[in-house]
Amino acid sequence: MTYNPTIHRRKSIRLKEYDYSQADLYFITLCTHDRMPLFGEIIDGQMQFNESGIVADEEWRKTEHIRSNIVLHEFVIMPNHVHGIIELVGAHCMRPHGIRPECAGSDEQPERVQRAPTVGDIVRGFKSSVTKRLNAISGTSSQRFWQRNYYEHIIRNEGAYLKIAEYIQTNPQRWEEDTYHV
């Protein structure tokens, strides 16, 4: 069934008028479909990846190398969700072939102009690459791995960054109390 706004009435959880491709820090959370623990388990406060967890970890790390305008900060792959801080460095820093110059204060013009990827583009690419690899492993092409949307929060200051980074780093130790724990 295709999306029909009069029937489905989905409301966007994104900020209206905000450019999600602009240089900023974003805290994102992606959940697995039905919060199924697909990526492994927590043992003694440490995440132990299974094969799917290894794939998710590899694809998350590749994100920074695939896209020239992103810097990965703290992240954690949990049994049924992923938390991460991503930094978009801005469209003016994009270069072909993933070469990222030091951009602060640079007057250089990009070698070619292209639309800067948004946070949504980055999330979609990550989910897609994980899904393709997991479907190849399972020998199917129809299995659903991800919840439809994702949570994002724009990090506004250093205090918020430090609080979120600490939350991500200690998430495995707090698994039993985690809202995503099933």
Image (cartoon, rainbow, N blue to C red):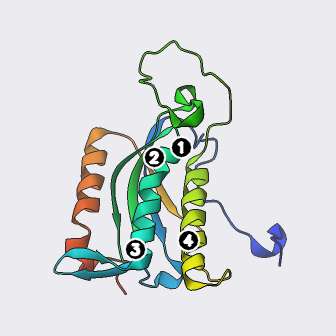
The C terminus - image quarter = bottom left
Helix, strand or loop for disc 1: loop
In the rendered image, the residue lying farthest to the top is 107
Tag in front: 4 or 2: 4
Q: Earlier in the sequence, mark 3 or mark 1?
A: 3
Residue at x-position 64% and y-position 41%: 17
* Residue 56, picture quadrant: bottom left
Q: CA distance from mark 1 to mark 4?
A: 19 Å
The answer to whether 96 is drawn above or below residue 86 in the figure is: above
Q: Give the residue at mark 3.
A: 53
Amino acid type for the residue under numbered disc 2: Glu
Tag in front: 3 or 4: 4
Q: Earlier in the sequence, mark 1 or mark 4?
A: 1
Q: Earlier in the sequence, mark 3 or mark 2?
A: 3
Q: Give the residue at mark 4.
A: 133
Amino acid type for the residue under numbered disc 3: Gly
Amino acid type for the residue under numbered disc 1: Arg
Viewer-closest of 47 and 133:
133
Helix, strand or loop for disc 3: helix
* Residue 126 image point, x, y percent: 54, 60
Mark 2 near mark 1, Cβ–Cβ under 8 Å? yes
- Residue 28 visible? The answer is no
* Residue 67 image point, x, y percent: 53, 43
Q: Give the residue at mark 1.
A: 67
